Image: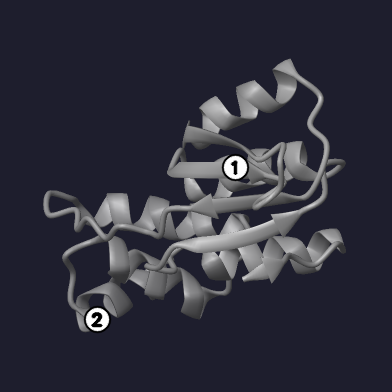
Amino acid sequence: MGFLPKAKAKRKNKLIELAFFPYTLIIYESPKRIESLVSELIERFGNRKASLVREISKIYEEAIRGNLDCILEKIKEKKVKGEMVLVVEGYKRQLIKNFSEEDIKKELIRLLKEGFSKKNSLKIIQSRYDIDRQRLYNISTQI
């Protein structure tokens, strides 16, 4: 992945795009922005496993491992300096099998309010729920 965009809107869109990426993400970030990045990741990705590595391949190399919330806590406890590399676990698909049409509608409305397009919202829902495309489309037309 490398560096995320600095502009707030572009950064948000990139995180939305990466939220359901199934592979491990490797993100470079400055010490000044690492706390806000981890907070954004928790908001968008949930509390995934991650590792924050500082000063890779140098004398003062340090790694913090755990869930994103644990890493955020450690960052807040002490001032971090140096080059930062954040390694974040990829999305693990877990299909929800027991759901109602009402659950689907609520999820669709929530995603639309968060700024996702209808097309992307439907893709996200289909990746989370055990539902065929035609049924999902029919439910979405009722909103």
Tell which of 91 and 96 is nearer to you: 91
Residue sitting farthest toward the top: 77
In terms of depth relative to the viewer, which is nearer, 114 or 64? 64
Residue 6: % across, % down: 85, 62
- Residue drawn at x 80%, y 64% is 9
Q: Label for residue 9?
A: none
| Mark identifier at residue 133 | 2
Instruction: Locate the N terminus by quadrant.
Output: bottom right
Instruction: Check disc 1 and report the residue beneath it.
Output: 52
In the rendered image, the vertical position of residue 117 relative to residue 30, given as above or below: below
Residue at the far left in the pictured view: 98
Q: Quadrant of residue 135?
A: bottom left
Give the residue at x 52% y 36%.
Answer: 68
Across and down, in percent, residue 18 comes to: 54, 67
Q: How is the image coloured?
A: one colour
* Nearest to N terminus: mark 1 or mark 2: 1
Residue 134: x percent and y percent?
A: 22, 83
Q: Quadrant of residue 113?
A: bottom right
Q: Amino acid at mark 2?
A: Arg
Within 10 Å of the Cα at label 2, are there few (<14), some (14-19), or many (20+) other Cα atoms? few
| Distance (Cα) linking label 1 and label 2 | 38 Å
